[in-house]
Image: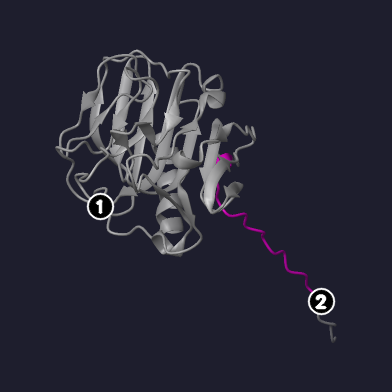
Amino acid sequence: MNRRPRSGRRTVAIVTPFSPTKIPGCVSWLRSDKLVTLSSGKVSAWGDSSSLGINGVTQVTAALQPVYATTGGANNRPYFNCGQSAYSEMRFPISAFISSAPNACDTFIVFNNDTDPPTGGGTGTIWVGSATDNEGDIPYIDGHFYDRWGRNGASIDAGIPTGNKTSTVCVYNVASTTGNWTSFLNGTIITTTSTNTYGISPNARLFSLNSAFYLKGKAYEFIMFNRVLSSLERSQINHYIYNRYGISGV
């Protein structure tokens, strides 16, 4: 008996690309290729791609706005060219995000300094609160990593990390809550302490404290969660960043 062949139907799985918002608790996702507002070739506002969509990252002072480059960055991505003179620095207030992370944060930033350690002005400052809270110099002019992001207390001296450093594109990550503060470079722990009181200054901003403390280099992405991530979640974020910016050998 001859049977007619069945007209089979294939089920095609639709794979959605990974993004930081797939991990619960993403309260800020700023990327240099999306929601960037320009004024005469400089960045005046940076829109939030997280599910919260908070639009509070602005810089109205033209002298402090970074120059925007559409190509030529890591993996030929766009980037913000920060701090190329002592008074041309990026100072973006992020206080709008602070209330979304009152008890803990896990923060990632993708950037590189022009030189490591910094020379000719700047100290590699990537985020600050006030003059006494939350400043991170990654690295300082002595090559050490000093940071207190998410920390009410003295800066943590992580020494001079080995491996892929800020002269090339890197991922710097801080996980902070009361009772724990840990920093990572390209997924590897560089320092940790159980002596920590969590806090972020309401004056927090990105990339500059003043004309002596600022990032001189390229900035690509900023991601912040309102909790400390698991090891698996941290690995997912790192691999997303590595693939996006062509980071290898880490």
* Residue sitting nearer the eye, 82 or 199: 82
Relative height, residue 3 to residue 20 (above, below): below
Majority secondary structure of the magenta segment? loop
> Quadrant location of residue 249?
bottom left
Residue at the image position 22 percent from the left and 34 percent from the top? 145
Residue at the image position 17 percent from the left and 36 percent from the top? 144
User: SS of the residue at dot 1?
Assistant: loop
Mark 1 vs 2, N-terminal side: 2
Image quadrant where one finds the N terminus: bottom right
Dot 1 amino acid type? Ser
> Quadrant location of residue 137?
top left
Q: CA distance from mark 1 to mark 2?
A: 61 Å
Q: Which residues are magenta?
A: 8-21
* In-image side of 15 versus 182 (left or right): right
* Residue sitting nearer the eye, 109 or 119: 119
What percent of the width, then of the height, locates residue 105? Answer: 44, 26
> Quadrant location of residue 122?
top left
Disc 1: which residue: 167
- Whether residue 137 can be seen here: yes
What percent of the width, then of the height, locates residue 118? Answer: 22, 44
Say the numbered circle drawn on residue 6.
2
* Residue sitting nearer the eye, 113 or 59: 59
Relative height, residue 99 to residue 222 (above, below): above
Dot 1, crowdedness within 10 Å: few (<14), some or many (≥20)? some
User: Is 11 covered by the magenta stretch?
Assistant: yes
Dot 2, crowdedness within 10 Å: few (<14), some or many (≥20)? few
